[in-house]
Amino acid sequence: MRRAIEHVPVSQSDTSEVRGTVTLAFADRHRRRIRLMDDAGDAFLLDLPHAVRLGDGDKLRLVDGGVIVVRAAAEDVLTITCSGPIATAKMAWHIGNRHTPLQVLKDGRLRIIDDHVMRDMVQGLGGVVFAEVAPFDPLNGAYHGLGGGGHGHSHGNDHFEEPHDHDGHNHDHAHSHGHSHSHSHAHAHAHAHAIGEPHDH
């Protein structure tokens, strides 16, 4: 079986031969070791040193040369339009304060995974929400090296991981199952709570 042992971010120049693509939903793109099928139906083993958030356009380097390109699958998302840049910045703050992965589109709109609670919050804050099916490729947080977006599922297990979604909610927080549950919960609340404001989660 082919084996992919290195993650090459889309931002890193790489001229390796492309030997396939693999299209994954957001919930399936935070991995360390798992058996996957590429888009042609051929199996390969993802076997990285640590868990990584795979972004659209990232590459997975194969042991025997060449790479497999990661593609973000189309899924149910909410695309958000605000009245202006200040309103957009405030909306992004509120979304981030709830530890929800967020994509900023090239036209300045925001995108999150479809969730009725978040939809109600966004509309309550004055945002216009458009439900659609589209690829979701959120920003990586300051903790990306620890597994991405705030916490990061760094499963140290050597068995093949199976997708799991915590009752349908994609929390994208990483446990580090090594098995002493070292939750990176010094998650340093990087979202500047204003003095005197309640910390609402």
Image: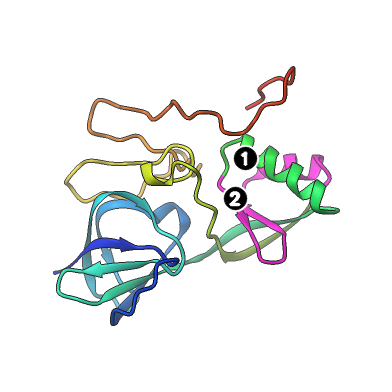
Which color scheme does this rendered protein use?
A: rainbow
Q: Earlier in the sequence, mark 1 or mark 2?
A: 1
Q: Dot 2 corresponds to which residue?
A: 102
* Front-most of residues 75 and 21: 21
x and y percent of residue 95 in the render?
Answer: 66, 41
In the rendered image, the vertical position of residue 28 relative to residue 118, given as above or below: below
Mark 1–mark 2 distance (CA, rounded to whole Å): 7 Å
Write the residue at 39% across / 63% down. 9
x and y percent of residue 80 in the render?
Answer: 73, 55
* Front-most of residues 122 and 120: 122
Q: Residues within 10 Å of mark 1 (few under 14, many from 20)?
A: some
Q: Amino acid at mark 1?
A: Gly
Check if residue 152 falls in the magenta segment.
no
* Front-most of residues 53 and 86: 86
Write the residue at 38% across / 46% down. 145
In the rendered image, the vertical position of residue 165 relative to residue 177, given as above or below: below
Q: Which residues are magenta?
A: 101-126
Q: Is residue 150 left or right of residue 16?
A: right
Q: Dot 1 corresponds to which residue?
A: 96
Q: Residues within 10 Å of mark 2 (few under 14, many from 20)?
A: many
Q: Amino acid at mark 2?
A: Leu
**Residue occupying the far front of the picture:** 13
Labels 1 and 2 touching (C-beta < 8 A): yes
Question: Which label is found at residue 159?
Answer: none
**Residue occupying the far top of the picture:** 196
* Helix, strand or loop for disc 2: loop
Q: Is residue 93 left or right of residue 156?
A: right
Q: Is residue 89 left or right of residue 63?
A: right
x and y percent of residue 188 in the render?
Answer: 50, 28
Write the residue at 43% across / 37% down. 151
